[in-house]
Amino acid sequence: MTAADREGDAGLRPAPAGDGGQRAERGGSGIDRRAGSGGSGIDRRALVDRHAVELTGIVPESPLSVGNGEFCYTVDVTGLQTFPESYPVANPGGTGTPGTLLGTQAQWGWHSVPGGQAYDLAETRRAYPTPRGPVEYVDMRGALSGVAEAPESPAEAWLRNNPHRLDLGRIGLVWSARSTGGVSTRAPGPAELTDPHQRLDLWTGTIDSRFRLAGTPVRVGTVCHPERDLVAVRVESALLAEGLAVRIAFPYGSQEWSNAADWSRPSAHSSTLRPAPDGAVLCRTLDDTAYSVAVGLPDGARLLHVGAHEFLVTAGSPVLELVVAFTPGPGPAAVTALPSYAEVVAASGRHWAGFWGAGGAVELAGSRDERAVELERRVVLSQYLTAVHCAGSLPPQETGLMVNSWRGRFHLEMHWWHGAHFPLWGRPHLLERSLGWYAGILPRARETARRQGCAGARWPKQVGPDGRESPSPIGPFLLWQQPHPIFLAELVHRSSAEPETVLHRYADVVFESAAFMADHPVRADRGYQLGPPLVPAQESYAELRHQLSNPTFELAYWSWGLRTAQRWRERLGLAPEPSWERVAAGLVRPYVRDGVYTAVDVPPYTVRDDHPSMLYALGLVPPTGLVDPEIMRATLHGVLADWDWASTWGWDYPAIAMTATRLGEPQTAVDALLMPVPKNGHLPNGHNRQTAALPVYLPGNGGLLAAVALMARGADADAGRPTPGFPDDGQWTIRHEGLHPMP
């Protein structure tokens, strides 16, 4: 997708008014519920400004990013990428070269190392017995865990590692010096930096960084263009006349878990400089990947080629304004078409003011609960982070356009957690950017279903842009991503100003998803059953995949998804599909043991670590006839009593809050959403850190926003009951506008 193609998407259109500006209050409760777009008087500028991020030093876990959903540039305390080693990303098991949080990534920026032509998924397929006979699944014989892996064969390794997302370049400050031998450079050390103060202005999308190097003041402004893969920086310092310069360097692609840049193979790629008016074009070639980098320079600045993949920008004055644009393909970009730094700042300001001014808002000011300030901060920052990292033309990677965990490949079972909140917050077009990708991989998904003897399309789990499955003992056996496109399309339909257009746009994806869902279950004594083989959302059972069946969450989600797809047929004037209703109504009932729902219906029934996914059969999933609320209530409190929280993931906490909200337990919902455990923390920059190898985790941010939308605006079943997820105890004051109810 080109910048011109995206320009129509980038405009932030006002959301349709959810409640027509009506206001409902509950006297004496401490709850002030206001709904509707623009009618409740929330001062959005004040709301956003009070959560601007300010740092006064190097915070290794918490760098700042500017971006637009398609492109992201992450910086350290200098406003550039000067100290990458100070912001490390660990590799699982301590092996390999540590990565850095300071990435420069774009949705189009992918690379594969040579040699993969000899590998085919056929080498990894393995037949499993199923109720319908032997079925081949893409598998992996090597070891795999949530954050570590050990492929057994070269085919497994290459097919998991390629394509991988590419770090497009590093832009940072260096000291430069001329000598008879040319120009030498030296990166400053963190010890040379003093008096740092950095501020991310959320309302304008700009970063202002001030500090001293060697005792001399430096100020750096950093901003990303809202419609182009372009970063602009302004450096002000007397040091520019004394050897301070900006270095642009390029790495090779990396197949490592946490490192998108390989600096050890300079001969494996090329970087060439082509002079152009007002700057230069740097042409990059890495095997079959090519892209160009246009660099716009002010009068008096120079761009020098000082190393195989290293370029130096020197200034002729105390101010250096630098514009760097990244473009896919071998053709050079036009430098003369680059905007100025001031123009990028203005465009960013208009974009982010439009973003914050449209769509949903939640304000908790005036609440007496001491956690309200932190929750409001998380809500505001999560909106910014998901707009930067999760609003692009591909489903997002779990660590966004920042870190290459899973080598930048995206996980479709997480797409709901990244993007469901966009339509709930009145910004459906931001989800639609990636939702349309499913139609592009329909041929692959249909072929997967056909190989397994089923109609329709079966969606993969861990993929790159081409949608090719990854060898795994987990991913190909997951089922819970299958209804996601139905749910996401339904949310877009409910919140769109053009619902009829949405129906036609996504009908094929919805219907092909449902066709597989109706054909995959097999009739058994107790009804239509799921599996074996399968791995539930709670992946702790992966070693037992050959014998697992009927996970509680997936059964409920299957039923709801099939009936929702049937409603799409009705809306389009099509006859209902009898098999869809037959399977939805005839699914096996979730298994109950000792008065609570189990994760699966065979031993060990429930392992008490990882995701407590049985809870999400009534939470993420709206009410269905398969789930008894009182049994689910007992299940919820059983989980809260003794679950292994250290093994959970960041989206589990908002998921539990949604379940508690649907059960009418608002205090439990708030307590779960803000549970004080490490996996549920949010850093100063707003990111949801999990581990040193998974230092940012966007499903936690998106999940938070989905949960808060449900807690504040409610669901269809609430029939307008205000703020059903917050206690009516005088401790909470909730104002919201522009939110849409959950199904």
Image (tube, grey):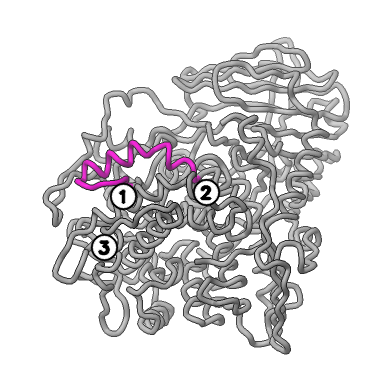
Q: CA distance from mark 2 to mark 3?
A: 26 Å
Q: CA distance from mark 3 to mark 1?
A: 33 Å
Is there CB contact under 8 Å for labels 1 and 2? no
Foreground disc of the pair 3, 1? 3
First-in-chain label (2 vs 3): 2
Q: Which residue is tagged 3?
A: 583
The reply, left or right, for residue 117 in relation to residue 99 is left
Is residue 450 shown in magenta?
yes
Is residue 471 shown in magenta?
no
- Which residue corresponds to the image point at 56% horizontal and 48% vertical from the top-left? 390
Q: Which residue is tagged 2?
A: 502
For the N terminus, the quadrant is: top right
Is there CB contact under 8 Å for labels 3 and 1? no
Label disc, if present, on residue 144 of the rendered structure: 1
- Which residue corresponds to the image point at 37% horizontal and 58% vertical from the top-left? 566
Identify whether 87 is placed above or below 674: above
First-in-chain label (3 vs 1): 1
The reply, left or right, for residue 508 in relation to residue 303 is left
Q: Could you tell me which secondary element the residue under label 2 belongs to?
A: helix
